[in-house]
Image (cartoon, helix red, strand yellow):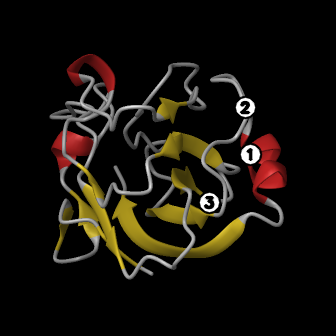
Amino acid sequence: MKVFCPALLSGKYFATKHADRGIQGGQNISPRVSWSDVPPGTGSFALSMVDRHPVANNWVHWFVLNIPPTTREIPERASGIYDHMPPGSMELRNSYGDIGYGGPKPPRGSGPHEYIITVYALNVDSLLLGPFSKLDECLRAFEGKVLNSASVVGIFQQ
């Protein structure tokens, strides 16, 4: 599988519009994410965006389950008030406590944070998890169900 996120300027940095509204210029706009080279037998996809910086401690910015197997992209502005997520998909609560996308907002002076966007091809049509499921619960539910996955990393700092 391959994952592409055109929101990453120079293939590396998130534009400020994708940051949390608490950042000057931040608009909390979810980025476009697309994928290709899907393995046969894919029943659904899941998408995560996690800040793995030691200060962030696996802060979940976005987690989506049950993305239909025919889907190959989530468009920009799909999450939140825009609600253009693929039919049947389910956005989970992020670490800010909201359902859907929550843009980068690293602590000032903590240096560059890497936001890992991963798309998982799963061999099941759906996972029976609720919107308040935690990252570790989701990853446990993935065990034995991931056919393939791919990631791209975006950087943001303030």
Q: Label for residue 110?
A: none
Q: Name the residue under label 2.
A: 129
Q: Where is residue 64 in the image (x, y as percent from the top left)?
A: 51, 41
**108 with respect to 28 (left or right):** right
Residues under numbered marks 3 and 2 in contact, where contact means CB atoms less than 8 Å apart: no
Mark 2 and mark 1 residues within 8 Å of each other at the beta carbon:
yes
- Going by the numbered disc 1, the residue's amino acid type is Cys
Q: At label 3, which amino acid type do we have? A: Arg
Q: What residue type is labelled 2?
A: Leu
Give the residue pinned by disc 3: 52
Q: Distance between the residues labelled 2 and 1?
A: 8 Å
- Left or right of 49? Residue 143 is right
Please give left or right for residue 100 compared with residue 51 in the image. Answer: left
> Image quadrant of residue 121?
bottom right
Q: In this view, does 100 lie above or below 146?
A: above
- The label on residue 138 is 1
Question: Alpha carbon of mark 3 to alpha carbon of mark 2: how far?
Answer: 23 Å
